[in-house]
Image: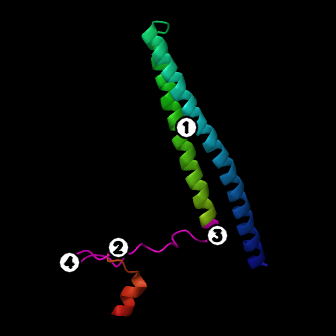
Amino acid sequence: VALKKRQENIHLQVTQGILNLQASEEFLKAQDGNVDNAQEALRLAQIEYRQGTATSLDVITEELALVNARADYYRAVHDYQMFLLDISSAVGIVGEEPIPVIEESSSEFEPENSTPAQQGQSLSDKEIQK
């Protein structure tokens, strides 16, 4: 009974995570469009200012709008990454990717206090060699 309940809970977490990720992706695209619009509005305000048809306050207002649009975009990127992490956690694959092995350099020096990961080995490989 407990196993069945746990499986249902995982299924719910994954389903929710996928829905959140899809919504977040759409929101991220919208925020990217908002940044493009803010950049164009600033460009036009700068042209109008040079032509004398806009004030410096108009340009500053558009610069602020661009800063806010970029902040919203990066918040959306963060949210997207967090939803991706939620899904990974729900299916149990967080931290499962192996540490990439760094190719040997011309120097054969390895610090004595380096960790197995820093030496390009997993802990289990290090233990096997002992």
Q: Which mark, by number, is residue 91?
A: 3
**Amino acid type of disc 1?**
Asp
Labels 2, 1: front one: 2
Q: CA distance from mark 1 to mark 4?
A: 46 Å
Q: Position of residue 59 (x, y in %)?
A: 46, 17
Q: CA distance from mark 3 to mark 1?
A: 29 Å
Which sits earlier in the primary sequence, circle 3 or circle 4?
3
Is the C-beta separation of discs 3 and 2 under 8 Å?
A: no
Which sits earlier in the primary sequence, circle 2 or circle 1?
1
Q: Can you name the residue that lies furthest to the top here?
A: 52
Is the C-beta separation of discs 1 and 4 under 8 Å?
A: no
On screen, residue 128 versus residue 95, left or right, reads left
**Amino acid type of disc 3?**
Val
**Magenta segment boundaries in residue numbering:** 89-118
Mark 1 Cα within 10 Å, few/some/many (few <14, many 20+)? some
Q: Nearer the viewer, residue 31 or 2?
A: 31
Q: Which residue is mark 2?
A: 102
Q: Which mark, by number, is residue 109?
A: 4
Q: Secondary structure at mark 2?
A: loop
Q: Which residue is mark 1?
A: 72
Q: Position of residue 65 (x, y in %)?
A: 52, 26
